[in-house]
Image (cartoon, rainbow, N blue to C red):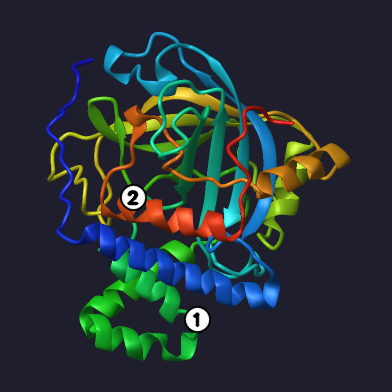
Amino acid sequence: MTAPSTNWKENIAPGEEALFEKLAQDLGGLQAGLAKKRGIHRGLHAKANVIARATFEVKENLDEHLRVGPFASAKKYDAVVRFSNGGPIVQADKKPDVRGMAVKLIGVGGKKLIPGMQDCVTQDFSAILTQSVPFPTPEAFVWFVLAARNPLTLLPKAFMKFGVGKTLALVKTLQAGLGAPVMQLQTNRYFTPLPIRLGAHAAKYCFTPVGPQNVRSDGADLGGEFARHLAGQDVKFDFQVQLFTDETNTPIEDHTREWTGPWTTLGTLTLQKQDVNSAEGKKLSEWAEKLSFDPWHACEELRPLGAMMRARSPAYRVSTMARQASPEPTAIP
């Protein structure tokens, strides 16, 4: 396979760092306000549907340009996986929401990105059901999250902020993504709509379900249905990447666009058959809920790219400090 283009670049605007710090504090204010009513939770993805232990096995004989970071050689890592609803409050699964999948690999060597955490042995991946996000900038995303606290005034405020045409287009895209029915968590493909480095290259990744996908649920209890399924059999996802080719087809900074191009499998994530409602399963869930799943918990070779990813760095820091998240683990208990 011919190595793809390395001619990607980020466009960092003047004053961006200060803006992103302000946006992080704004989201932190939302988190603090909600904490007065419900106790401290994650600022987003507050509801965990299922938390499970897993393994991540890197394929053998990957092409050389793909052998970077945790994919440098065929290896099996322990992992913990958290499936969640994306909103800042815990609500019924039937309600429209973002659905997320976060994975933490344990035992990954190499220098990490976050200052003071360079020697940690974790690598995080986070993904949702859509391949793009409808918000053109981090500022627009944070504005929308804060304005959505009052649904009755959201549209009028959005018309004033973005204009009628852009607002209606945004709402249409949101409805298409959030309104799609989700019957089971384990039958879906989860994507990062935001790119990362892959060594000298840039990429997006996804988790693609492997094996039978029999849907028997009405979507009212996503965690319960997944727990029943996982109690009877393994659940597997192939980890795949889509590589940057050019700014037209695979833009780094335009997160509203889906990338085009083939997917290549680098490894397989296996959630072993387990009872997540057992005493052991509940202990794992309690332990994992104190962790943070952050795309900046990453090797230098897998650094997050683009404005949305850069804005997530201070946002995660503010959120995890507020809820006093646990230090990065060295093993799964």
Tell me which amino acid carries mark 1.
Arg
Please give the residue where the numbered disc 1 appears in the rendered image. Answer: 149
Rendered location of residue 282, percent (x, y): 80, 45
Tell me which amino acid carries mark 2.
Met
Secondary structure under the numbered disc 1 in the rendered image: loop
Residue at the far right: name it.
279
Q: Left of 285 or right of it: where is 95?
A: left
Query: What is the quadrant of residue 54 in the picture?
Result: top right
Rendered location of residue 75, percent (x, y): 52, 14
Secondary structure under the numbered disc 2 in the rendered image: helix
| Above/below status of 260 relative to 91 | above
Q: Front-most of 204 and 96?
A: 204
Residue drawn at (48%, 67%) of the image = 28
Rendered location of residue 169, percent (x, y): 28, 73
Query: What is the quadrant of residue 201 in the picture?
Result: top left
Residue drawn at (41%, 31%) of the image = 112
Residue drawn at (56%, 47%) of the image = 292
Q: Left of 248 or right of it: where is 91?
A: right
* Label 2 to label 1: alpha-carbon separation: 24 Å
Rendered location of residue 221, percent (x, y): 71, 59
Please give the residue where the numbered disc 2 appears in the rendered image. Answer: 309
| Above/below status of 239 relative to 190 | above
